[in-house]
Image (spheres, helix red, strand yellow):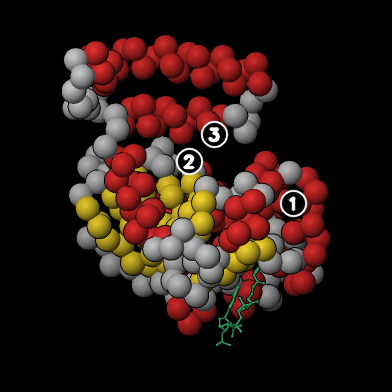
Amino acid sequence: STQYEHILTSRPNPSVALITLNRPKALNALSTPLFLELNKALFDADADQGIGAIVLTGSDKAFAAGADIKEMKDKEFSDVYKNNFLANWGELSRLRKPVIAAVSGYALGGGCELALMCDIILASPTAKFGQPEINLGVIPGGGGSQRLVHAIGKSRAMELVLTGRMVSAQEADQWGMISRVTDNVVEEAIKMATEISSKGQLAVQAGKEVVNAGYELTLAEGLRFERRTFHGLFATKDQKEGMAAFAEKRKAEFTHS
Ligand code: CAA
């Protein structure tokens, strides 16, 4: 398997990929080399037929404290514009398998945005979310201003982006930004990933695709897309097996076909 410098990869069980951000001295600041490794590990896991879901985590102290400020500080407009700085961050949202963020400690700036790019966020009681870019004379550049509006609405998104205030896991939970707060967040995320992996993977992929489509489409288009995708699943063996198993009062044996 690939050796990485800034992340750790493992398989807590055969169907789950665990990716751990690992730049402890910089609180997992998201440098360009780290993001290149992260994208490679994510796409490798996405392409691996044995894996049903991916868990992304950091350390107890920090999920990630944002883009690497030391790397960014001397960049000029011409550099960031020419090279489309941060454009490759969005690659995570092209994955077809579900990604669960297990957040402990700081998820700030790009770290908060990275969590928001994941499909599900679980947080430990220690998690702190925020978009402190305003204190650096900039604004979020990894999608925070847009994804936060979808997640928590305009007023709360505006408050976070304009004040830079950090919110606790509990507050993020009340705001509907995350699924829930839990102790042993990595273990819980692995459990959830394992459960998702036990379902028919075609249906999982379709479920992720239609939920995400809701961000891009009008309601009428989204409903049509959902209906067509639902119809399409009647062409799969997993639909036949899932419904037959229910009628026969037994557990479904999905073959992901
Ligand atoms: N980039 C680079 N290095 C960082 C970093 C970051 N985002 N966050 C922390 N570090 C480094 C610190 O510089 C420090 O390194 P040294 O030991 O070499 O000095 C080390 O990590 C430990 O950090 P602190 O000593 O600051 O730890 P703390 O516990 O006192 O404070 C913190 C923790 C409140 C998270 C503080 O580190 C902090 O405010 N970090 C920056 C948060 C931030 O502004 N994030 C937004 C970045 S911009 C962005 O993300 C743009 C975007 O939209 C994509």
* Residue at the spot of label 2: 94
CA neighbours of label 1 inside 10 A, class few (<14), some (14 to 19), many (20+): many
- Kindly tell me whether mark 2's CB lies below 8 Å from ligand 1: no
- Residue 31 is situated, as x and y percent measured from the top left of the image, at 52, 69
3D distance between C-alphas at marks 3 and 2: 10 Å
User: What amino acid does circle 3 point to?
Assistant: Asn
Q: Is residue 9 left or right of residue 145?
A: left
Q: Which of the two discs, 3 and 2, sits closer to the camera?
A: 3
Q: Secondary structure at mark 3?
A: helix
- Residue 81 is situated, as x and y percent measured from the top left of the image, at 69, 57
Q: Quadrant of ligand 1?
A: bottom right
Q: Secondary structure at mark 1?
A: helix
| Residue 31 seen from this side | no
Quarter occupied by residue 196: top left
Which of the labelled discs sits on residue 139, or is there none? Answer: none
Q: Is residue 29 left or right of residue 249?
A: right
Instruction: Please tell me which residue is depicted at 75% across the width and 72% down the height of the picture.
Output: 136
